[in-house]
Image (cartoon, rainbow, N blue to C red):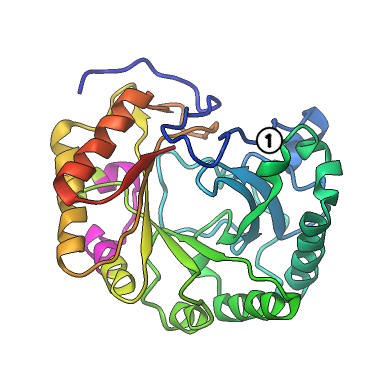
Amino acid sequence: MSPIKHQTGREQPESATTSGGSSMEPAMPDKKEKRFQTAFGCSREGLGNRFVYVVISPRARGLSIGINMNPGKDCNFDCAYCEVNRCQRSSEESLDVDIMCVELQKTLELVRSGTIHQQSLFRIAPPGLLKLRHVALSGDGEPTLCPNFSKAVQTVAHIRARSGSFFKMVLITNASGLDSPEVQNGLRYFTRDDEIWAKLDAGSQEYYEKVNQSKVPLEKVLANILFQARQRPLIIQSLFPAINGQAPSPVEIAQYAERLKELKTAGACIPLVQIYSATRPTPHSECGHLPLKILSGIAQTVRETAGLRAEVF
């Protein structure tokens, strides 16, 4: 692929899908709120929470309540496009499950009652985008590295059971820790309607090291994805950035699609591959956003090679 013009991460990608309404996210907070800005481009100050936040997510197609499972920013990946600044210390070192429990119940009530519309970040949002789509186990670091992961998931499951109305849980992960006993214990509380969204940004070890910069080998990531996707449907999340103005090469995209094909052939149930690019400011100035045309081409390669459903966000 030819070089592309470097763009800032602030630009939001245009969605290639037509379902689910607008992909618009909340406006950036004002200057007073910027010091509270999270990795999700939304201020936590509005809700006054330490671990629970709310965003309008294009990939969720609406409102997502997130739980910061790793507020201490611990991660075994150092992705080129990551918006988390790990040079700055966090005010929270670890997840307090008891406090998270109270915050989640309060936030769920805000959403269910419609009071969330009174929050400054959501006042102009169309009502359709303020419908709860899921509760995401995510955070400023890799959520599966959370030492009390199982207790946190069990707590969310109990809140759901007592609430009288079902909401989906989604684990958003780089897949490196899906095989750990702590995570396996936590996933026992997932129903068949809950989901795992696993990162896969590369098809070769070389490109994986360039983009994800992890000591965890790509082979293990693929093995963990296969292990989980044989047990339950698993959604693949793939972010392709422009690095120094360059898109991934056609060879790399072909290898990426082949890895997906191999997973499917080996029995992985992958109902969707989400293709998107860097959209928010990062500490890495060399990382930018790919245009829709290139992302659409990647999605088409996935469809043709792996026979999987692929959408661009």
Percent position (x, y) of residue 233? 36, 67
Q: Is residue 218 magenta?
A: yes
Quadrant housing residue 85? top right
In this image, 136 relative to 161: left or right?
left
Report the residue marked by disc 1: 26
Whether 36 is drawn above or below 106: the answer is above
Whether 202 is drawn above or below 81: the answer is below
Q: Main secondary structure of the magenta part?
A: helix
**Label 1 SS:** loop
Q: How many marks?
A: 1
Quadrant housing residue 27? top right
Q: Which residues are magenta?
A: 208-223
Percent position (x, y) of residue 313? 44, 37
The quadrant of the image that shows the N terminus is top left
Quadrant housing residue 37? top right
Amino acid marked by disc 1: Pro
Judged from this view, the residue extending furthest toward the top is: 5
In this image, 100 relative to 1: left or right?
right
Whether 27 is drawn above or below 38: the answer is above
- Judge the density around disc 1: few (<14), some (14-19), many (≥20) Cα neighbours within 10 Å: some
Nearer to me, 298 or 43: 298
Percent position (x, y) of residue 155? 67, 79
Percent position (x, y) of residue 90? 67, 53
Nearer to me, 36 or 235: 235
Whether 298 is drawn above or below 132: the answer is above
Image point 25% across, 31% down: which residue? 297
Q: Is residue 57 magenta?
A: no
